[in-house]
C-alpha cells in the first residue's frame, strides 16, 4: 500500500491546500494511506479530523523575533519534535512526505530526507517561507504558484502547479442568483464583498466604518461586509443600530462560495489562498496586504498581480484614507473591472491539487519500480 505523510499547517492558508492535496491523492488512488502531521494546539488538529484524516501533533513552535527566555522553550520543543518525528517516520514508513509550510513541516521534513524518503514541498506564496527555504536543497520537487521562484529554490526542482483551492468555490462560480438569495441582497445592484478573512481585519473594518455615510449614498451598490467574529460585537456597538440599508454586516460567511459568486468587486487581504481563489473565479479585486506577516509576503503576493494589471492594491496604512474612494472609482468603471477580471483569470491554474498529487504518485511509482 502507498503511504504519504502531509505536514504543515498553522493557518487556513496552509491547511486548505494540504487537505486539497490529500483529497486529490484519494481520488487518484483510493487505496493510498495518508497521515497528517501538524503542530499541537493549532487549527489543523481540529480541521484535519473533521475532514476524515488522521493527524499527529508535534510540540513545535516558532522562534520569537526578539531575545527572550521563551526561545529556550522553543528550542526544547524543537528537539522533542525531531524525536517524535523520527518515531512517526519509523512507525508509518511513508513513501513520500509532502510539506506545505508551517511549523510542523520543518522537523518531519528534516527527518524524512535524513531517512532517504523523498520530500515534496508546496510553496503557496510569491516570497518563500523560512521552513521551505531551509528544506529546499534536499527536496525532490518544489511545487510553486508564482513565477520567478528560482531566487529561492533550485530551478531544476521547481514545478509550476498553482495553489489548490476549495472545490466548492468553483462549483458555485456561476451561482450569482443563489448568492443574492442566500444573503438577502438586491439582484439589480452591484455587489461589493468586503472580507478580512474569517477572523476579520481591523484596518479594513475601520476604513468601511469611517465611510459608511458615503457608501449609503451609492444608490446602485450594496456591500456584503464580513467583519470577522472578533470585531462583530464592537462594531455593532459603534454602529448603534445605524447601519445603512445597502450594507449587510456579518461576522462570518458560512457560504463563501455563494458570497464570491454574487460579488462584482472583492476587497480582501492578499493571502496566497485568497489570491488563488480570486484568480480561478476571475474576480476584480482590491487587495489590502496584511502588514503582520513574515517577510511582508502579502505585499509581494499582491504586487505579483498589480504588475500584471490583475488587481489594485491599497496599503494597510492607507486603507482608512483611500479604500472607499478606490472602491467607488472601480464601481463607476465597468471596463476597468472587466479588464482586471480578465487579467486575473489568466493567472489561475485549474486542478492544482491533482497536478501536485500526480507529482507525488510519480515519485512513488519511480521508487517502487
Image (cartoon, rainbow, N blue to C red):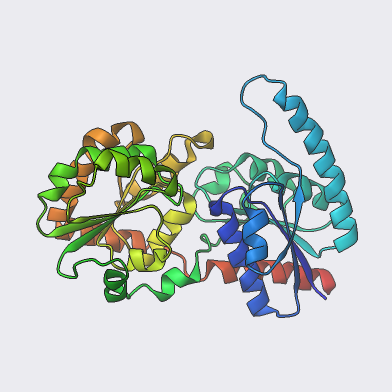
Point 35% across, 35% down: residue = 316
The N terminus: image quadrant: bottom right
Left or right position of 195 against 149? left
Residue 73 vs 185, above or below: the answer is above
Q: Say which of 157 and 139 sits in front.
A: 139
Q: Residue furthest top?
A: 67
Residue 45 vs 209, above or below: the answer is below
Q: Position of residue 178 (x, y in %)?
A: 31, 75
Q: Say which of 40 and 153 sits in front.
A: 40
Q: Position of residue 4 (x, y in %)?
A: 76, 65
Point 69% across, 40% down: residue = 134
Q: Is residue 114 visible?
A: no
The C terminus: image quadrant: bottom right
Q: Position of residue 367 (x, y in %)?
A: 82, 68
Q: Splitting the image into 4 quarters, where does residue 221 fall?
A: bottom left
Left or right position of 172 against 52? left
Amino acid at each position: 500500500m502507498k503511504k504519504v505523510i502531509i505536514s504543515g499547517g498553522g493557518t487556513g492558508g496552509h491547511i486548505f491546500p494540504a487537505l486539497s492535496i490529500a483529497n486529490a491523492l484519494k481520488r487518484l488512488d483510493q487505496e493510498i494511506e495518508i497521515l497528517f502531521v501538524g503542530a499541537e494546539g493549532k487549527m489543523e488538529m481540529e480541521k484535519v479530523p473533521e475532514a476524515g484524516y488522521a493527524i499527529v501533533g508535534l510540540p513545535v513552535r516558532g522562534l520569537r523575533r526578539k531575545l527572550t527566555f521563551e526561545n529556550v522553550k522553543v528550542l526544547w520543543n524543537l528537539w522533542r519534535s525531531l524525536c517524535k518525528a523520527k518515531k512517526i517516520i519509523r512507525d508509518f514508513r511513508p513513501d513520500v512526505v509532502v510539506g506545505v509550510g508551517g511549523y510542523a513541516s520543518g522537523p518531519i521534513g528534516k527527518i524524512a530526507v535524513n531517512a532517504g524518503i523523498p520530500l515534496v514541498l508546496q510553496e503557496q506564496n510569491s516570497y518563500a517561507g523560512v521552513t521551505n527555504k531551509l528544506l529546499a536543497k534536499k527536496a525532490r520537487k518544489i511545487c510553486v504558484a508564482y513565477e520567478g521562484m528560482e531566487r529561492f529554490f533550485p530551478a531544476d526542482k521547481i514545478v509550476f502547479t498553482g495553489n489548490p483551492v476549495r472545490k466548492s468555490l468553483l462549483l458555485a462560480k456561476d451561482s450569482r442568483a443563489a448568492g443574492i438569495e442566500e444573503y438577502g441582497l438586491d439582484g439589480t445592484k452591484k455587489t461589493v464583498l468586503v472580507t478580512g478573512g474569517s477572523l476579520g481585519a481591523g484596518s479594513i473594518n475601520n476604513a468601511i466604518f469611517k465611510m459608511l455615510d458615503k457608501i449609503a449614498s451609492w444608490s446602485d451598490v450594496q456591500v456584503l461586509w464580513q467583519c470577522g467574529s472578533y470585531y462583530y460585537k464592537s462594531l455593532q456597538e459603534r454602529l448603534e443600530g445605524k447601519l445603512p440599508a445597502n450594507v449587510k454586516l456579518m461576522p462570518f460567511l458560512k457560504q463563501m462560495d455563494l458570497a464570491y459568486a454574487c460579488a462584482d468587486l472583492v476587497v480582501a487581504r492578499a493571502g496566497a489562498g485568497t489570491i488563488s481563489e480570486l484568480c480561478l473565479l476571475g474576480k476584480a479585486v482590491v487587495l489590502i496586504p496584511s502588514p503582520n506577516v513574515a517577510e511582508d509576503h502579502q505585499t509581494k503576493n499582491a504586487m505579483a498581480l498589480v504588475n500584471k494589471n490583475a488587481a489594485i492594491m491599497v496599503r494597510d496604512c492607507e486603507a482608512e484614507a483611500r479604500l472607499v474612494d478606490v472602491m467607488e472609482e472601480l464601481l463607476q468603471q465597468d471596463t476597468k473591472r472587466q479588464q482586471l477580471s480578465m487579467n486575473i483569470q489568466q493567472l489561475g491554474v485549474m486542478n492544482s491539487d491533482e497536478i501536485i498529487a500526480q507529482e507525488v504518485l510519480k515519485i512513488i511509482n519511480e521508487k517502487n519500480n
